[in-house]
Image (tube, rainbow, N blue to C red):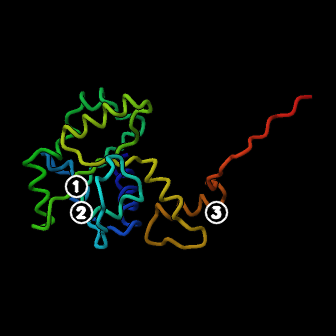
């Protein structure tokens, strides 16, 4: 599942104008903390943001990111609540100073990259969500992107009448859209009630 989640994330960044470099294509016999970094992303046309960026990034926020280290946790049946985060310290290996500084050298001296974690979901309740965000921030994570945002953007931007020969993922989305498996989002202003007989 990790390879699929990484492919989806890579396509997302590339579709939004980023240059993406995979940290390592092979799986070493001995794992080190460095192995947890999935991508280095660079936006050659990054814009300057006024104010503080949000912690949970949406696609519209990507244009303000110049460089980032991205870690993908494609545990699609999990919600990243404070309990899971506290019980799984390996999630945070990529933000440890030794690992992060070694990875940051890939970008040269032009500034420190953001530390971005891609996760399936955060808790629904505001209190639990705030606890998770506080824990992630306290560990050194700069931002989170939810898979729902990634998938929604990929589906929205894939055109039915375009051939995505270089991307199997976008080609599959295109085929699903062509056969109406993905519907356009609709705004329901007036719900119709079932008539009584």
Residue located 38% across and 50% down the image:
5
Residue neighbourhood size for the residue with mark 3, other residues' Cα within 10 Å, grouped as few (<14), some (14–19), many (≥20): few
Residue located 29% across and 56% down the image:
51
Which circle, 1 or 3, is nearer the viewer?
1
Is disc 3 placed on a helix, strand or loop?
helix
Residue 80 lies, with reference to residue 16, above or below; the image says above
The reply, left or right, for residue 21 in relation to residue 95 is right
Comes first in the chain, label 1 or label 2 = 2
The image quarter containing residue 77 is top left
Residue 122 lies, with reference to residue 48, above or below; the image says above
Q: Nearer the viewer, residue 118 or 124?
A: 124
Q: Please say if the residues under marks 3 and 2 sit with CB atoms less than 8 Å apart.
A: no
Is disc 1 placed on a helix, strand or loop?
strand
Distance CA(mark 1)–CA(mark 3): 37 Å
Q: Which residue is mark 2?
A: 67
Comes first in the chain, label 1 or label 3 = 1
Residue 114's label in the rendered image is 1
Residue neighbourhood size for the residue with mark 1, other residues' Cα within 10 Å, grouped as few (<14), some (14–19), many (≥20): some
Distance CA(mark 3)–CA(mark 2): 35 Å
Q: Please say if the residues under marks 1 and 2 sit with CB atoms less than 8 Å apart.
A: yes
Q: Nearer the viewer, residue 78 or 187?
A: 187
Residue located 13% across and 51% down the image:
100
Q: Which residue is mark 3?
A: 178
Distance CA(mark 1)–CA(mark 2): 6 Å
Residue 81: x and y in percent read 34, 31
């Amino acid at each position: 599942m990790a390879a699929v989640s990484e492919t989806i994330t890579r396509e997302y960044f590339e579709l939004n104008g980023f240059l993406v470099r995979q940290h390592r294509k092979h799986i070493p016999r001995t794992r080190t903390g460095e192995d947890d970094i999935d991508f280095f992303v660079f936006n050659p046309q990054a814009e300057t943001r006024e104010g503080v960026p949000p912690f949970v990034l949406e696609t519209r926020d990507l244009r303000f990111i110049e460089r980032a280290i991205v870690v993908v946790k494609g545990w699609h049946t999990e919600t990243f609540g404070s309990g899971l985060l506290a019980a799984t310290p390996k999630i945070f290996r990529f933000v440890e100073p030794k690992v992060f500084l070694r990875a940051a050298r890939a970008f040269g001296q032009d500034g420190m990259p953001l530390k971005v974690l891609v996760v399936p979901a955060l808790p629904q309740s505001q209190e639990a969500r705030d606890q998770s965000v506080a824990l992630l921030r306290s560990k050194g994570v700069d931002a989170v992107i939810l898979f729902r945002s990634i998938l929604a953007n990929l589906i929205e931007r894939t055109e039915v009448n375009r051939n995505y020969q270089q991307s199997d993922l976008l080609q599959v989305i295109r085929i699903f859209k062509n056969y109406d498996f993905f519907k356009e989002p609709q705004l329901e202003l007036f719900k119709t009630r079932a008539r009584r007989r």
